[in-house]
Image (tube, helix red, strand yellow):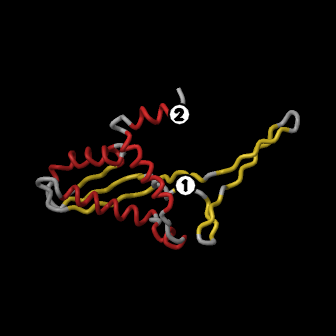
């Protein structure tokens, strides 16, 4: 079957308009400027800010539980943000040995060369402490909830009133 026949069959399906819309949206996203490197650096969040925002979200969630009269949450981090960068690998053979050399791949953005980030890893959480104003009877529920939300062992979560 030739390409023209496939295109005709595809254009008669219900999915075709969505495919065209997705393609147009993808092209539009590629054409939109992404701002300067200073703006990109300003958008990055450090580990302290991440912990602070996480504490606020957890406090808000716990305070919405029925019977909890207020709380204070502290989140302890094991690490900071880490990144996996794009690398260019070159393999060379000199008979019996193999040499591998790696170099970071950089992208130019407004005159600055920045390494290309493939993946960003969030800081790992080592523990959480929660002090309840009222509602000490909810300590076990709160511990279970935090364990599930943060993927932490319950021994790393302390809840008291």
Numbered label tally: 2
Query: Residue 3, labelled with which disc?
Result: 2
Give left or right: position of 38 versus 136: right
- The relative height of residue 20 versus residue 133 in the rendered view (above or below) is above
Query: Residue 129, labelled with which disc?
Result: none
Residue most extreme to the top:
1
Give left or right: position of 112 versus 54: right
Q: Dot 1, crowdedness within 10 Å: few (<14), some or many (≥20)?
A: few
Residue appearing at x 81%, y 41% in the figure = 92
Q: Position of residue 6 (x, y in %)?
A: 47, 32
User: Which quadrant, please, contains the C terminus?
Assistant: bottom left
Dot in front, 1 or 2: 2
The residue that mark 1 highlights is 83
- The relative height of residue 40 versus residue 64 in the rendered view (above or below) is below
Give left or right: position of 7 versus 92: left
Q: Secondary structure at mark 2?
A: helix
């Amino acid at each position: 079957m030739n390409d023209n026949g496939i295109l005709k069959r595809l254009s008669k399906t219900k999915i075709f308009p969505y495919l065209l819309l997705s393609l147009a949206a993808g092209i539009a996203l590629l054409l939109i400027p992404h701002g300067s490197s200073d703006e990109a650096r300003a958008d990055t969040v450090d580990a302290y800010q991440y912990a602070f925002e996480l504490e606020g979200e957890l406090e808000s969630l716990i305070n919405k539980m029925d019977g909890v009269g207020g709380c204070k949450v502290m989140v302890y981090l094991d690490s900071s943000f880490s990144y996996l960068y794009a690398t260019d690998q070159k393999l060379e053979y000199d008979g019996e040995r193999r040499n591998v050399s790696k170099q970071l791949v950089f992208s130019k953005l407004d005159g600055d060369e920045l390494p290309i980030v493939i993946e960003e890893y969030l800081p790992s959480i080592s523990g959480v402490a929660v002090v309840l104003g009222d509602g000490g009877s909810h300590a076990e529920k709160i511990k279970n909830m935090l364990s599930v939300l943060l993927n932490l062992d319950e021994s790393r979560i302390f809840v008291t009133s």
